[in-house]
Amino acid sequence: MKRTLLASGIGLLVAGAVFGQETPKFAFNLGGGFTEPVGRTGTKLDTGWNISAGAGYNFNSYIGALVQFNDTQSDINGTTLNNAGFPGGDVNIWSLTLNPIVHTHPRGPVDVYFIGGGGLYHWHQEFTAPNVAAVTAFDPFFGFYQALIPTTDVLSSYSVNKPGVNGGVGVSFGTKWNVKFYAESRYHRVFFGDRHADMLPVTFGIRW
């Protein structure tokens, strides 16, 4: 009887361990970081920032796929602005991509993974100039009065949708919960026909 109870207890422990190691069917990520323009793009833009969010499916513990939204913004550098004759400007790029992901050690405390894919990239650029605007303000003592506030005038803007690809590597650190912290570097290239834009976002966040 004792042996039967002992065997049953061991069986329950093993089953619990196996169940605890099951890979969730759905995967999510959320992160942010900095973006380094590279190549010719790096001669036009300053280092910027990025955010990333995604949802996907795990086919097994090693292979999955994520649909990801990424948004990155960088200021146009001073040399380019001076040559173009504008006081200010920036470039915003958001993308919606499908990215297969391959994990090397999915159940370990540290997992190195490879991720890459492609999809739609939206490029928006603006050249701007500082300005001031007159507004009507109110103070309980002074009453209504005219005030000047700083504003930004858009002198020129351009938007376009283009295809692009990306690929990179990341490392995630497990916790006792089904949440992992990750750091990732991925190369993005946006195609414009006769030219392309290249960026290297470095992103930190959580995945679960």
Image (cartoon, rainbow, N blue to C red):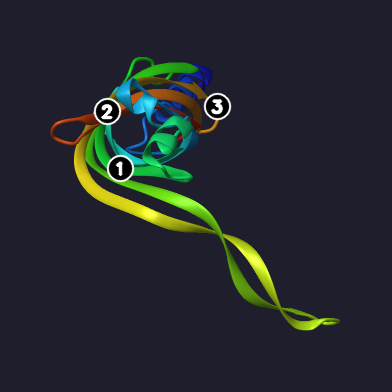
- Image location (x, y in percent) of residue 183: 47, 24
View extreme (left): residue? 193
Q: Residue at x 35, y 24 (%)?
A: 186
Residue at image mark 3: 175
Residue at image mark 2: 166
Residue at image mark 1: 95
Q: Amino acid at mark 3?
A: Thr
Q: Is residue 206 visible?
A: no
Mark 3 vs mark 2, foreground winner is: 2
Q: Is residue 203 left or right of residue 103?
A: right
Q: Residue at x 19, y 30 (%)?
A: 195
Q: Is residue 39 left or right of residue 32?
A: left
User: What is the CA distance from the residue labelled 2 to the residue labelled 1?
Assistant: 11 Å
User: What is the CA distance from the residue labelled 3 to the residue labelled 1?
Assistant: 30 Å
Residue 72, picture quadrant: top left
Please state which of residues 93 and 129 is positioned toward the viewer in this rendering: 129
Q: Amino acid at mark 2?
A: Asn
Precedes in sequence: disc 2 or disc 1 = 1
SS for callout 2: strand
View extreme (right): residue? 141
Q: Is residue 15 visible?
A: yes
- Image location (x, y in percent) of residue 83: 39, 35
Tags 3 and 1 in contact by the CB under 8 Å rule? no
